[in-house]
Amino acid sequence: SKPIILQVGPYPEWDQTPLDSAFEVKKYFEAQDQPGFLAEHGPTIRAIATRGELGADRAMIEACSALELISVYGVGFDAVDLDACRERGIRVTNTPDVLTQDVADLGVAMMLCQSRGMIGAERWVRDGSWASKGLYPLKRRVFGRKAGILGLGRIGFEVGKRLAGFGMDIAYTDIAAKEYAPGWTFLPDPLDLARHADFLFVTLAASAQTRHVVNGDLIACVGPEGMIINISRASNIDEEALITALQNGTLGAAALDVFEGEPALDPRFLDLDNVLLQPHHASGTIETRKAMGKLVRDNLSAHFAGQDLLTPVF
Ligand code: 8YV
């Protein structure tokens, strides 16, 4: 008989079909009464397949008393209660590497889009302003300006490589200088990075330790001419301080792919024109999502075949 797994959120059809044929899949996201569903099926569940932003909380993990593995469709595993997993020796896997290039692409695209006012420019063409009012207002250049990368991991490094192509002066903060970043300035203090940066990229893996690392002080250091681009997790930024700074102009602009409480977002964002809003889709290409789905399944299959996990968190 097939191993029974709990699927927390939906996947595209190209992932659903092979998942359904390899495993007996209990679809949590389709249940009307989710606590009742967990109480009924929890004891039979041997693995959880979840999404980066959905994770698995302690209550879910505890309801699954025979749980062996959580396979995350995403590189970020901050929404999985790792302590609850460690206590019971439950393994966790994620999908690193396969999404790195797309996430970096979108971060850089967001910088360009916001700095050059492309959303407003599109509207200018469509609503006839170009013909009636003339030239579109001038925006700020990207080429040759200063970039800061907060967290030079896989994604941060790929962002930096792209920014080098724009002739930018690149600095980064991480726990230590990285030898693979020659010519980029290591600034151990995030406040120094924020002072340096016209464009500050937040590319940190989120955890309890990184919560609100981008706080009011740091936002003030990026300043009225600066922009913050977040392609990591909302929890890395103090969103209240961010909104206040955007409202009063002490921060120039932001470009965000992630939000507290997403997909519901703070309605105050909608009244601001100095922020670019994206629906958490940095990894959202067909190519990458197919690779992520395959890795989720391959980790599950390896586990049940008694083989090494492909991409273990632990
Ligand atoms: C999501 C992500 O997992 O990789 C991550 O950490 O946040 C994303 O790739 C994606 O939205 C699919 O759920």
Image (tube, rainbow, N blue to C red):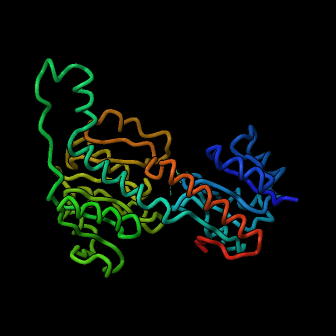
Residue 277 position within the rendered picture, expressed as x and y whole percent measured from the top left: 36, 41
Question: What residue appears at the point 30 percent right and 71 percent down from the top-left corner?
Answer: 173
Residue 108 position within the rendered picture, expressed as x and y whole percent measured from the top left: 30, 53
- Residue 303 sits in which quadrant? bottom right
Above or below for 87 versus 47: below
Above or below for 5 versus 301: above
Instruction: Pick whichever, 239 or 41, lies toward us.
Output: 41
Question: What residue appears at the point 64 percent right and 57 percent down from the top-left corner?
Answer: 56
The single residue placed furthest to the right in the displayed view is 1
The number of numbered discs placed on residues in the rendered structure image is: 0
- Residue 124 sits in which quadrant? top left
Above or below for 6 versus 208: above
Q: In the visual, does 202 lie left or right of 76?
A: left
Instruction: Pick whichever, 286 or 216, lies toward us.
Output: 286
Question: What residue appears at the point 67 percent right and 71 percent down from the top-left corner?
Answer: 91
Residue 230 position within the rendered picture, expressed as x and y whole percent measured from the top left: 36, 54
Quadrant the C terminus occupies = bottom right
Question: What residue appears at the point 72 percent right and 40 percent down from the top-left corner?
Answer: 30
